[in-house]
Amino acid sequence: MKMRADRRSFLRSWAAGAAATALGWLQPVLALAAGWNKAAFEAGNIEGAIQFAGVGEAIPSEDIVIKAPEIAENGAQVPVEIQSNIPGTDQILIFSDKNVQPYVGLFEFRNGAEPFISTRIKMGDTSKLRAVVRANGKYYVKMREVKVTIGGCGT
Amino acid sequence: MKPPGTARGRALRSAIGALLVAITGASPAAQDGPEADRERMVNFFSERFPGVPLQDYVYGAMIVSADARAQYEQIMEFPPFLGDLDAGRRMWEKPFRNGRTFADCFPDGGRNVAGNHPYYDATLDKVVTFEMALNRCLEDNGEPPMRYGEREPMGVLSAYARTLSDGMPMNVQVQSEKARAKYEAGKDIYFRRMGQLNAACAGCHMHLAGRIMRMEVISPTLGHATHWPIFRAGEELMTFQGRFNRCMEQMRAAPFGYNSEQWNNLEYFLSYLSNGLPLKASVFRK
Amino acid sequence: MTRPIRMRVRLDGDVAEIRALIDHPMETGLRKDSKTGELVPLHFIRNLTVSLDGKPVLEAQWGQAIARNPYIQFRVRGAKADDEVSIEWVDNRGERGHASTKVPPAG
């Protein structure tokens, strides 16, 4: 499939996948040893999640900027943006304290990627949202309360 | 012409009419009919929400919350339901057995047509919705019609087809006496108390618009008809009439049902009230 | 079945702004199927990598709390037009997804 080199290039994966299969190449670039912190992801409380994620020593920092709703419209799609202004940042980790499993995910930035991520997460209940940042091997944290309600007419 | 409906409905409407007269200073005897209703509705809400531009009523309950609106905008930049819109586009573009497509049934390939619906069809003596028009297209081309209220194919097809009219100002016409009768029938439903909770649509969506009920902000009548279908939580596809059904159930009344005369007439009335406001289909809602 | 990944890339100077929406149910394992009443099993993307010009720029580890049809937006310095942007993911069932596109000219 010819790629359009215009302002917003846009390509569906089934075309790429089909082409790749046809070429006999579906070699995952994704490192098989990418790792997945099972203990942290499966921890059922924030203390455990933080401990297993190895970020227990995180220092509060105002150089982490969280953009998140005051009141989430819907806990299934909560837009969250995290920007780290701490030099040497290479990781951002997200926790939602009251989630059944508070550890939401980790984003690692390499080869010129800026320490900024915009994504959408699930939040089960009104909770602190924690953005933890790793910079030069040290951890820093910023917290933000996000209210989540379940309204009567929404159900 | 005496509007149809129950004595109670007319009494409530008179009360609301009196309220509107008090607010707007308009004389009900001098001004009558859909355009007068629409103007009164606009005046009612501009008093209720001073400073909110008319065009913003398409955002419904979000007019009271910048926080809600910011989330909507972030999600709408790249909405999670694009897969459904793609599926809808494939349905829209797939030729019928006779080789024609949906685009052949509408002017300009189906662009900027949704805002002309519902319309009154004199031959049928019925209000015709956009969904009925899609089915008419199928039947005219020897294809079986879709069932109303089903997510697929009707919901997903209309989710895409309606986006072809994004930005179009609502442009519903009520021009004959018979069309007016349908409009008034829809209006009567809107003001009629129903169900175990004895609630009328107008009671909440006019008088309590912007207030909180059941932990939700109540959306205003103005703009209601402009933004369907919605994707609740970005995934549950709900049409305008789907919302009528759900709301009526929440008021503890048995809903009239998809494509009922009542819902089609109500949609006709509500769409007229939103004339001039820009349509936007397939939007995120909480 | 290959799940679609929709990508939008913009180049501003030498910064590529990469946005992607990845079709995936991201099931928590806690949701009941409305028709069957059964719990829908856990099914979510665990690892995701975005590469630019052959080098990994974003590596993510996710749990089931990332939203359905996940969205990511981030920026990479040192990008140029025609660089390949590719995304790969693997989920908890070992299913994989992949897509790639090119950085368009700056604009």
Image: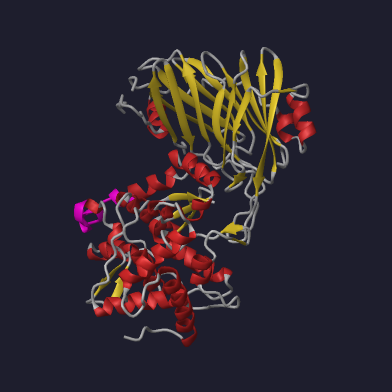
Q: Report the residue at 64% width, 50% height from top.
A: C31
> What kind of colouring is applied to the model shown?
secondary structure
Rendered-image quadrant of the N terminus of chain B:
bottom left
Q: Report the residue at 55% width, 27% height from top.
A: A117
Residue placed most toward the observer, A20 or B67: B67
Q: Report the residue at 48% width, 71% height from top.
A: B202
- List the single residue furthest toward the front: B25
Residue placed most toward the observer, B32 or C26: B32
Q: Is residue B150 in view?
A: no
Where does the image place residue A18, in percent across and percent down from the top left? 39, 31
**B141 versus A76 height, above or below:** below
Where does the image place residue B78, in percent across and percent down from the top left? 44, 38
Where does the image place residue B45, in percent across and percent down from the top left? 45, 61
Where does the image place residue B68, in percent across and percent down from the top left? 54, 47
Left or right of residue C97: residue B137: left
Left or right of residue B79: residue A134: right
- Range of the magenta residues? B91-108
Is A16 inside the magenta-drawn segment? no
Q: Is residue A111 in view?
A: yes
Left or right of residue B124: residue B69: right
Left or right of residue C47: residue B102: left
**B107 versus A35 height, above or below:** below
